[in-house]
Amino acid sequence: MSGIFQITWPSATGVLYKVWKSPELANWSIARDWASALTPPVDALEIDLTPSNGYFRVEAKIQ
């Protein structure tokens, strides 16, 4: 798999979100650092998967 992938999640005002990525579920790196929701009630992030696929998780923190 390669190209642009869009990950979406439910979001709310007053909550910070961090998006993590990993190629194999063992080592995680930050895809987007803590940021407020950009478009509540659903937020999105486009990620370039070139040259391979990956796994993603979204972490939330109430401000």
Image (spheres, rainbow, N blue to C red):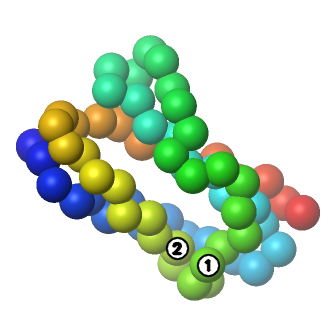
CB atoms of marks 2 and 1 within 8 Å: yes
User: Earlier along the polypeptide chain: callout 2 or callout 1?
Assistant: 1
Asked whether residue 57 is in view, the answer is: no
4 up-or-down from 52: above or below: below
Helix, strand or loop for disc 2 = strand
Task: Specify the quadrant that holds the N terminus.
Answer: top left
Side (left or right) of 16 relative to 45? right
Between 27 and 61, the residue placed more toward the observer is 27
Give the residue displayed 44% in from the left and 37% down from the top: 21
Mark 1 = which residue? 38
Give the residue displayed 66% in from the left and 50% down from the top: 33
Residue 23 at what x, y percent from top left?
Answer: 32, 27
Give the residue displayed 12% in from the left and 47% down from the top: 2
Residue positioned most to the right: 63
Q: What residue type is labelled 1?
A: Leu
29 up-or-down from 31: above or below: above
* Numbered disc total: 2
Mark 2 = which residue? 43
Side (left or right) of 51 relative to 41? left
Q: Mark 2 against mark 1, which lies toward the viewer?
A: 1
Helix, strand or loop for disc 1 = loop
Neighbourhood count class around disc 2 (C-alpha, 10 Å): few under 14, some 14–19, many 20 upward: some
Residue positioned most to the left: 1
Side (left or right) of 32 relative to 7? right
Neighbourhood count class around disc 1 (C-alpha, 10 Å): few under 14, some 14–19, many 20 upward: some
Residue 16 at what x, y percent from top left?
Answer: 75, 61
Q: What residue type is labelled 2?
A: Asp
Work out how far the residue at label 2 is from the one at label 1, CA to CA, in angstroms: 6 Å
Residue 14 at what x, y percent from top left?
Answer: 82, 74
Residue 36 at what x, y percent from top left?
Answer: 72, 70
Task: Specify the quadrant that holds the C terminus.
Answer: bottom right
